[in-house]
Image (spheres, grey):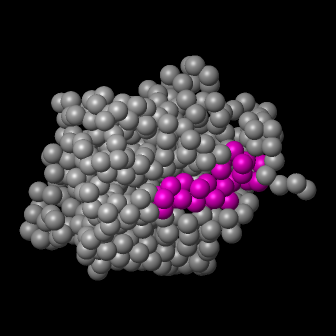
Amino acid sequence: MNATDNAFILICSALVMFMTPGLALFYGGLVRNKNVLSTVMHSFALLGLASIVWAVVGYSLSFGTDIGGLIGGLDFAFLNNVGPGVENSPAGNLPHLTFMIFQCMFAVITPALISGAFAERIKFSGFMIFSALWIILVYAPMCHWVWGGGWMGEMGALDFAGGAVVHMSSAAAALACAMLLGKRKGHGREAFIPHNLPMTILGAGILWFGWFGFNAGSALAADGLAANAFVTTHMATAAGLLSWIAAEWVHGGKATTLGAASGAVAGLVAITPAAGFVTPMPAIIIGLGAGVICYGGIMLKNRFGYDDALDVVGIHGVGGTWGALATGIFASIGAEGLLAGNALQLWVQFVSVVATWVFCFVMTVIIFKVVNAMVGMRATDEDEVRGLDVSQHSETGYQI
């Protein structure tokens, strides 16, 4: 065990954990005030639910003994054989418990990302059952495919910190849920205006802060690779912020605070798969591309008619896809991409993108339909009009 690496990854685990409350604030500020608590609750409740599901079976399915390149075995179910030593640890320099808890925080925030798509119209009971099943049947296989010895990683797909595992998977699920749930009541006829943009900016800042643990921690050591991932993360995020507000300035005549927050998140998403494989200058290019591409990506819901309430598909889906492909173009550390003379890497990245979108979308449709038959997924019209804070939780976010 390397004590320095252990301390670093434990700190990174705490940073990634802090991202989920940050996401709660980011999403919470974007909805109407009658739905702020229900939206925040989606993220906060997953800190409990996803952690327990991960400990009981999710971690084992992700990192247990490989079964046909598709899923892990039950070696580590109920955290059996997961202790404070390095025995059985996928990272030989870290205690097994340290590696497990770092990965746990990724499993927490990924289903929380999905919740932005169905904000303001989902039943809490349906959300909880859906999320538990999704972690087991979608997130765990994806995690195993990429990082746990599964077929995607063996194929050579590059995903440093979760472009496919976290962002594309959650976006594909978000798209499926938005299409199956249908539009919010009054969508297209009423203005759905964010009720607290300062809350959203604060959430974006917390996400930016926590993302250093997300990406730099994925080096799994306190070394130069972690330093590179830290710097590329920051530079891509800064570039994404600037390119998004530039795009909206040209398109709409004004730069907005919501645009700045969205651009920063777009940059964070896009650099996630590439953070440890590219140097800082290509990271800036990736971030610049993310701001413009994701700004266009949020227009997709208007063109195709689905109600992705908080733009999960446009930012995490489009941004994650761009980041994965850009990794295949700009990779130069530990792997070579197109510009380094390896055109095959870009093809491998493309295959991984298509496989991720198809698998996660189809599985989410199946899970959604099963849970909908069990308890129902959508709140009633009456509950939606009253607001989910009152109808689902018997609370209000603000006392007037």
Q: Residue at x 50, y 29 (%)?
A: 368
Q: Nearer the viewer, residue 277 or 380?
A: 277
Toward the right, the furthest residue is: 400
**Given the current orientation, which residue lies at the most extreme top position?**
374
Residue 236 visible from this viewpoint? no
The residue drawn where x is 27% and y is 35% is: 64
Q: Position of residue 372 (x, y in %)?
A: 57, 24
Q: Nearer the viewer, residue 178 or 96?
A: 96
Is 122 contained in the magenta span? no
The part of the chain drawn in magenta is: 14-40
Q: Quadrant of residue 339?
A: bottom left
> How would you classify the magenta stretch by its main secondary structure?
helix
Residue visible at 37% across and 65% down in the picture: 8
Residue 363: image location, x then y, percent: 39, 31
207 w.r.t. 249: above or below: above
Can you see residue 36? yes
- Vertical comparison of 307 with 22: above or below: above
Magenta-span inclusion, residue 32 = yes
Q: Which quarter of the figure is the N terminus placed in?
A: bottom left
Instruction: Describe residue 23's horizontal placement relative to residue 332 as left or right.
Output: right
- Eyeballing the image, is 108 above or below 241? above
- Identify which residue is drawn at 35% across, 76% down: 231
Horizontal placement of 253 versus 87: left or right?
A: right
Query: How far from the left and from the top, in percent, is residue 158?
Result: 23, 56
Nearest the camera: 16 or 14?
A: 14
Q: x%, y% of residue 197?
A: 68, 66
Horizontal side of residue 398 vs 317, given as left or right = right
